[in-house]
Image (cartoon, rainbow, N blue to C red):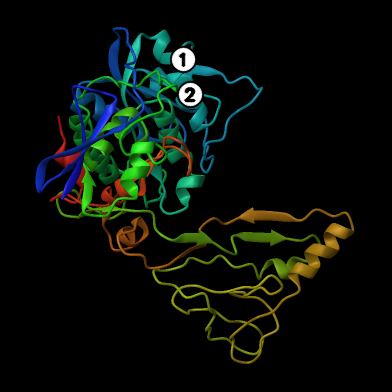
Amino acid sequence: MRRLLLNKSSPSTLLLQRRDRPGAQSALTRSRSSAVKVRAAQPCLVLSNDDGVESPALQSLAAKLRGETGHRVLVVAPSGNKSAASMGLTLRHDMELRMRPDLGPDTYALAGTPTDCMMVALDATKGLMRALDLHPVMALSGPNYGPNMGTDVLLSGTVGAARTAGLYGVPALASSSTSTDKHSLLDNAVEATLALARVALETLGDRPARNWPRNHIVMGGMGRRHVTATCEYESLPHSWVMDVEQVLVDAFQGGDVYLNLNVPADWQPGKGTVQTTGLGLMFYRDSYVVSVPERTATAELQPVLVAAAGAVATANGNGNGNGNGNGNGNGAVSTSSVEYVGTNGNGHGNGNGNRITTTVVQDIAEALAAGLPVVYNNAYDTRRTMQIDRSDVMALQAGHVSISTLQTWPEGHTLCLSDRVMSRALLSGHDGMPAWMQGRRQ
């Protein structure tokens, strides 16, 4: 078997080596990386979220990080709730930054989004870390109230803050709970986050982020999708392998991959299990409750539907002739662009409740044509899922903690890791955590 190794004596050379023929090697070139010089500063952890600086779970995590890691913890979080903000920015508007000593030491509220918070904290020239003479070791975001699984990672402000930290060259993790009780301290999610943070800090050698501020000129790197050496490696037979675990560690240290943690509401530390997962198949349909002026009857027919594992999008309801039917086909109900399936109301039933058709879309069209407003309210809890093995969606539905390794950069970006590298990120260690972290702790 062959192995792709980095020649330590020559940073610009990669070696392809056969395990069964140690002497057989051929050189491949890669881009030469340059070290980023970092001035002396006090190391710290940076913490944010999208639920706002007053989140009890955020404050709980900050206090426990200070106590357990010994690091200074800088909290920079939105002054108000910014859920589902993704990586949105506040452009051309002032954002006030205020200290909140009532919430804990080194705690700041910013009138902006989660991404704004991370950028204000990590800006290399005018950011809060520079002002306080701090150097980030790792960034954490959360714990979030509500899961961030599947395509939610594209919508979540919590995940957006962690990904922003990665873009700035800082190792990062996002943390979420399936609980939506915003008065809860999310104790189990905090404990799971602390456990993952301990493993991550050990993997990082508990040292300041080596790639902050990020040097965007560095383009090369073993395992990168668009580097010549990697492209040649990807075309080789699968009997060829590279030191993938080290590639993943290097990428995490440089901020090019980050961790996404999800914790079931009833999970218990020391009792529940942990799984390393990929992103599951989850999407939204029928998310909106619609109010049409002078059409209040149709508004009653808007569905609020939550899909279950392996849901099939068909309505097999048990209804009656006046349109009072409920779809119960494996936990999901289907609608079309011209029909709405109601959970109650006076729709046009067919006697067996299989489908209730209304004229709500006609009401919408007529109201808009008449110059009247139509009000949409996103119920958001209308997730549809499918069974995909080793996915975060399935792990959470089975009551397991989910940990996913995600790419910081957009699909197709020059700095993305290759498919072979990312497939190895799905391997679990003995305790369920990612194997690449456990094998290379420093």
Residue type marked 1: Gly
Q: Secondary structure at mark 1?
A: loop
Where is mark 1, residue-wise?
Answer: 127
Image location of residue 414, percent across then percent down: 45, 36
Image location of residue 266, percent across then percent down: 28, 55
Image location of residue 261, percent across then percent down: 32, 45
Confirm whether residue 192 shows in the render.
Answer: yes
Quadrant housing residue 392: bottom left
User: From what the image shows, is residue 112 above or below residue 367?
Assistant: above
Where is mark 2, residue-wise?
Answer: 119
**First in sequence: mark 2 vs mark 1:** 2
Q: Is residue 290 left or right of residue 169?
A: right
Q: Are marks 2 and 1 in contact (CB under 8 Å)?
A: yes
User: Which residue is drawn at the image coordinates 48% and 43% (left, top)?
Assistant: 412
Quadrant housing residue 311: bottom left
Farthest residue, direction bottom:
351
Q: Is residue 101 left or right of residue 355?
A: left
User: From what the image shows, is residue 336 above or below residue 60?
Assistant: below
Q: Residues within 10 Å of mark 1 (few under 14, many from 20)?
A: some
Q: Secondary structure at mark 2?
A: helix
- Residue 325 is tagged as none
Distance between the alpha carbons at the discs numbered 2 and 1: 7 Å
User: From what the image shows, is residue 344 above or below residue 135?
Assistant: below
Farthest residue, direction right:
370
Confirm whether residue 175 shows in the render.
Answer: no
